[in-house]
């Protein structure tokens, strides 16, 4: 009986061994930077948004749930005028969890421990109150619009039920969101 000098063992990771699994309940609480869905072309502005989302893993690699966010952005148009936008965003979020998707579709055994890579789609409504101060005149108006955005994201779970997440792209209220994530 001979033993090969180099033996390769490939272990197939089953669906239950991923950072994201069907049946998971995920709560994300984050801070966002960089305004989306507002105006401010040619302006200087900065604000921080707050975003919370809950997702239920109803499929091996798909989760869905509601989100809510709040933001207040202030803009200064080079000393000529200043404005502020206060926004409330409400809607649904759906995520495709990439690692279990790749493992199933391509029969791969790739499974980085404690990491969840995903692509999320946000859709909902954004309620905004706009305030403009131009010279000696003040204007206020409000509007409601539909919002849609897609973001890649990453979740890192150093502990079993708590971790951090980050998303980059056209989210409900910001371009970049980072925060804490909980598996309930």
Image (spheres, grey):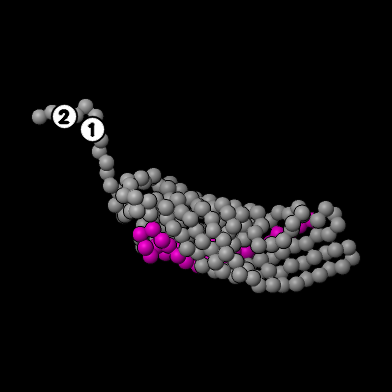
Q: Identify the residue position indicated by label 1 in the image.
A: 7
Residue 3 coordinates in the image, percent (x, y): 16, 29
Q: Quadrant of residue 183?
A: bottom left
- Looking at this view, name the residue that lies furthest to the right: 136
Q: Residue 136 vs residue 130: left or right?
A: right
Q: Identify the residue position indicated by label 2 in the image.
A: 3
Label 1 Cα neighbours within 10 Å, binned few <14 / some 14-19 / many ≥20: few
Distance Cα–Cα, label 1 vs label 2: 8 Å
Q: Are marks 1 and 2 in contact (CB under 8 Å)?
A: yes
Residue at left offset 77%, top offset 67%: 131
Q: 41 or 72, which lies in front?
A: 41
Residue at left offset 87%, top offset 68%: 137
Residue 2 coordinates in the image, percent (x, y): 13, 28
Residue 22 coordinates in the image, percent (x, y): 35, 60
Image quadrant containing the C terminus:
bottom left
Q: Residue 1 vs residue 10: left or right?
A: left
For mark 2, give the secondary structure.
Answer: loop
Magenta-highlighted residues? 51-76
Q: Is residue 138 visible?
A: yes
Q: Quadrant of residue 83?
A: bottom right
For mark 1, give the secondary structure.
Answer: loop
Residue at left offset 47%, top offset 66%: 65
Q: Identify whether 159 is placed above or below 62.
A: above
Disc sitting over residue 25 in the figure: none
Residue 75 coordinates in the image, percent (x, y): 76, 57
Indicate yes or no whether the magenta region holds residue 153. Answer: no
Residue at left offset 56%, top offset 56%: 30
């Amino acid at each position: 009986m001979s033993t090969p000098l180099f033996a390769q063992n490939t272990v197939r990771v089953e669906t239950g061994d991923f950072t994201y699994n069907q049946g998971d309940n995920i709560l994300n609480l984050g801070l966002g930077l960089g305004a989306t869905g507002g105006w401010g072309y040619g302006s200087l502005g900065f604000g921080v948004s707050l975003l919370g989302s809950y997702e239920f893993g109803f499929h091996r690699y798909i989760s869905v749930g509601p989100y809510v966010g709040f933001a207040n952005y202030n803009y200064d148009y080079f000393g000529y005028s200043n404005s502020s936008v206060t926004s409330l965003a409400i809607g649904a979020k759906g995520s495709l969890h990439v690692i279990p998707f790749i493992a199933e579709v391509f029969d791969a055994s790739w499974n980085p421990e404690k990491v969840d890579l995903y692509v999320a789609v946000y859709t909902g409504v954004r309620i905004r109150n706009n305030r403009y101060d131009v010279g000696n005149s003040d204007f206020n108006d409000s509007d409601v619009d539909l919002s849609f955005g897609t973001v890649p994201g990453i979740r890192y779970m150093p502990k079993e039920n708590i971790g951090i997440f980050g998303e980059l792209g056209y989210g409900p209220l910001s371009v970049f969101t980072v925060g804490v994530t909980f598996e309930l």
